[in-house]
Image (cartoon, rainbow, N blue to C red):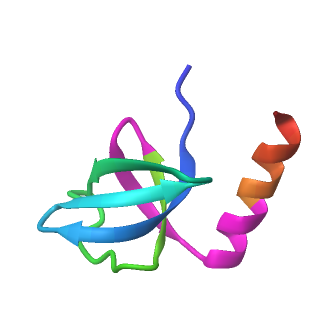
């Protein structure tokens, strides 16, 4: 089973981005979200950003994930 999680975009280089979630950084592909900007929250699944999400929704989701752990 795979899980898609929200992360904030820290850097963008072409169709690649560095995202961060709770201090963990990851390089991902932004091929499915070419309009993404630094500071946006994206849903990351299998190394790709698959959608851009609102900051409030991302923070709520992150808090729910923290409660589960």
38 and 5: which is toward the camera = 38
Residue that extends furthest to the top in the rendered view of this protein = 1
Q: Is residue 56 magenta?
A: yes
Quadrant that contains the N terminus: top right
Residue at point 41%, 58% (across, down): 19
- Residue 53 found in image quarter: bottom right
Q: Position of residue 5 (x, y in %)?
A: 57, 47
Q: Is residue 54 magenta?
A: yes
Residue that extends furthest to the right in the rendered view of this protein = 67
Q: Magenta region: which residues?
A: 45-60
Q: How many marks?
A: 0
32 on left or right of 8:
left
Residue at point 54%, 42% (across, down): 4
Seen in the picture, residue 22 relative to 65 is either above or below; the reply is below
Seen in the picture, residue 32 relative to 34 is either above or below; the reply is above
68 and 33: which is toward the camera = 68
5 on left or right of 44:
right
45 on left or right of 6:
left
Q: Position of residue 16 (x, y in %)?
A: 20, 58
Residue at point 34%, 80% (across, down): 37
Quadrant that contains the C terminus: top right
48 on left or right of 64:
left
Residue at point 78%, 64% (across, down): 60
Residue that extends furthest to the front in the rendered view of this protein = 23
Seen in the picture, residue 59 relative to 39 is either above or below; the reply is above
């Amino acid at each position: 089973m795979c899980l898609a999680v929200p992360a904030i975009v820290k850097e963008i280089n072409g169709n690649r981005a560095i995202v961060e979630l709770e201090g963990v950084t990851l390089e991902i592909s932004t091929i499915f979200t070419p309009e993404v900007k630094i500071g946006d929250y994206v849903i990351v699944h299998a190394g790709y950003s698959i959608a851009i999400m609102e900051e409030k929704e991302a923070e709520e989701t992150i808090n729910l994930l923290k409660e589960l752990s």
